[in-house]
Image (cartoon, helix red, strand yellow):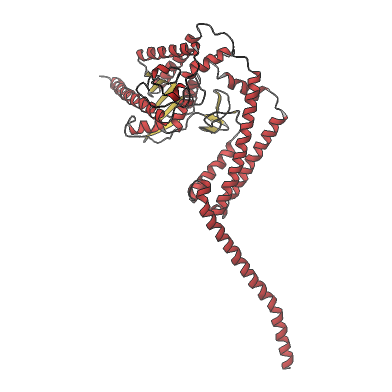
């Protein structure tokens, strides 16, 4: 009897041992996996800042990830050109072309400006081309307006309506579209004049009306709008769409719980998404170069003669657009200031350094005459009571190098130009407030 009981216990013990071994093995495995995960998190935490350039912070990372997901979901169309400032362009029904990744999009359509709606912010809309855009992007203009008290005691927000290559009447159209879209501005600043002279003359020489956008961009837009897509273009478009879907999948996975709280998952998601973006950017660059090459091959040779009245017509277009913009802003009770931008097309306006002497463009009498007439038109607008200023001599007392090419500026140049604009803006704002006070008193009646 006892022997039978002992045998039964031995059988029970033997049958229990495999289960115990499995539990011990499972426990050790779980501990190893846990240790591996903890090690991965610690290693990712150490590598996060060196790899990504930012420290790990859950809230800002999630905000940036969600914003990028919204941007990918909203994005429609593909860039037809990428400019020197890194700005991608797409076809626009009113402006000819517009930024793909700048400003505000509504169903893929860029709407100029996105000013804040709070009353404590003084919002300045900035019109013009690439020089004006860089003043906004670098923060030079915002700092000058804020530091100098040009906008009173309110916080300054500069809203770029400027786009590389824009010239009148594109700035006028951008202003109208922004106001019709409900954008609110406390002041509007326009910095241009050079594109109207140089690009306007280039249009005439290529048989394109000067009121139309840059002839080079029109050729690329025609390519997108009229030409049958080649097999290579379709391949690039398909690859771009695939990369966009890959980035969305990676970001969406990183946004799921509990991965969104993981340093390692955030790091892996950042690296994979960044890889997809780099590949997409490289493809866009290849496509842009292809379109540019084909556009140059199809473009009308730029050797058409320009008659003696061309410069006067270009200056009148600029002056008329300035007057119209000033009238629109006056009706909206918005201070409007227009400036003729400096450039090395007027080399006598600055003591040139050896580096700047090498940047002076080849003399073009037709462009110089158009620019001279635009400066005369600016003086006439100012004499008529408009806040229009010629800043071609803003560097007259600057002996240091400020130009990086024939018109774009380094940090020192942008700071000097922005401070001059801020000084003139302060005086114009004071006069506007005084006029508004007189108008209100006249409206009160006796």
Give the x, y percent position of residue 368.
47, 13
Residue at left offset 31%, top offset 24%: 427
Q: Can residue 185 be seen in the rendering of this structure?
A: no
Quadrant (top left/top right/bottom left/bottom right) for the C terminus: top left
- Hey, which quadrant is residue 283 in on the image? top right
Q: Compare residues 339 and 415 and report the one nearer the observer.
A: 415
- The reply, left or right, for residue 102 in relation to residue 150 is right
Measured along the vertical axis of the image, is residue 88 above or below residue 378?
A: below
Give the x, y percent position of residue 359.
48, 22
Total tally of numbered discs in the picture: 0
- The reply, left or right, for residue 117 in relation to residue 66 is left
Measured along the vertical axis of the image, is residue 86 above or below residue 324?
A: below
- The reply, left or right, for residue 389 in relation to residue 41 is left
Measured along the vertical axis of the image, is residue 390 above or below residue 253?
A: above
Quadrant (top left/top right/bottom left/bottom right) for the N terminus: bottom right
Task: Return the residue found at the far top.
Answer: 308
- Hey, which quadrant is residue 436 in on the image? top left
Q: Compare residues 442 and 162 and report the one nearer the observer.
A: 162
Give the x, y percent position of residue 126.
44, 27
Give the x, y percent position of residue 118.
40, 36
């Amino acid at each position: 009897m006892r022997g039978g009981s002992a045998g039964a216990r031995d059988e029970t013990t033997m049958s229990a041992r495999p289960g115990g071994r499995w539990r011990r093995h499972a426990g050790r495995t779980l501990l190893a996996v846990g240790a591996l995960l903890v090690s991965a998190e610690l290693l990712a935490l150490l590598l996060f800042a060196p790899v990504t350039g930012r420290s790990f912070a859950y809230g800002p990372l999630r905000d940036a990830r969600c914003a990028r997901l919204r941007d990918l979901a909203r994005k429609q169309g593909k860039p037809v050109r990428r400019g020197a400032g890194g700005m991608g362009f797409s076809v626009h029904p009113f402006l000819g072309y517009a930024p793909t990744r700048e400003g505000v999009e509504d169903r893929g359509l860029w709407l100029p400006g996105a000013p804040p709606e709070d009353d404590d912010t003084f919002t300045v809309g900035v019109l013009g081309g690439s020089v004006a855009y860089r003043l906004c992007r670098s923060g030079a203009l915002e700092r000058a307006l804020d530091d100098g008290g040009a906008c009173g005691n309110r916080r300054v927000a500069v809203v770029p309506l400027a786009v590389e290559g824009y010239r009148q009447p594109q700035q006028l159209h951008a202003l109208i579209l922004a106001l019709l879209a409900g954008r609110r501005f406390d002041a509007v600043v326009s910095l241009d004049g050079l594109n109207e002279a140089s690009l306007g003359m280039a249009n005439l020489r290529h048989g394109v009306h000067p009121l139309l956008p840059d002839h080079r961009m029109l050729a690329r837009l025609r390519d997108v709008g009229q030409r049958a897509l080649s097999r290579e273009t379709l391949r690039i478009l398909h690859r771009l769409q695939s990369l966009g879907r890959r980035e969305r999948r990676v970001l969406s996975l990183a946004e799921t719980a509990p991965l969104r709280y993981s340093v390692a998952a955030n790091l892996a998601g950042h690296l994979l998404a960044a890889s997809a973006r780099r590949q997409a950017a490289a493809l866009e660059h290849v496509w842009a170069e292809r379109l540019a090459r084909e556009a140059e091959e199809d473009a009308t040779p730029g050797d058409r003669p320009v008659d003696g009245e061309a410069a006067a017509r270009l200056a009148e277009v600029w002056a008329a657009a300035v007057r119209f913009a000033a009238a629109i802003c006056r009706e909206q009770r918005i201070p409007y200031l227009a400036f003729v931008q400096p450039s090395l097309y007027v080399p006598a306006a600055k003591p040139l350094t050896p580096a700047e002497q090498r940047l002076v463009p080849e003399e073009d009498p037709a462009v110089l005459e158009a620019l001279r007439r635009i400066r005369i038109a600016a003086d006439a607008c100012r004499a008529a009571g408009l806040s229009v200023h010629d800043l071609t001599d803003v560097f007259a007392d600057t002996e240091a190098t400020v130009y990086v090419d024939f018109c774009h500026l380094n940090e020192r140049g942008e700071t000097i130009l922005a401070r001059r604009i801020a000084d003139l803006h302060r005086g114009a704002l004071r006069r506007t407030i005084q006029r508004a006070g007189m108008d209100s008193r006249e409206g009160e009646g006796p």
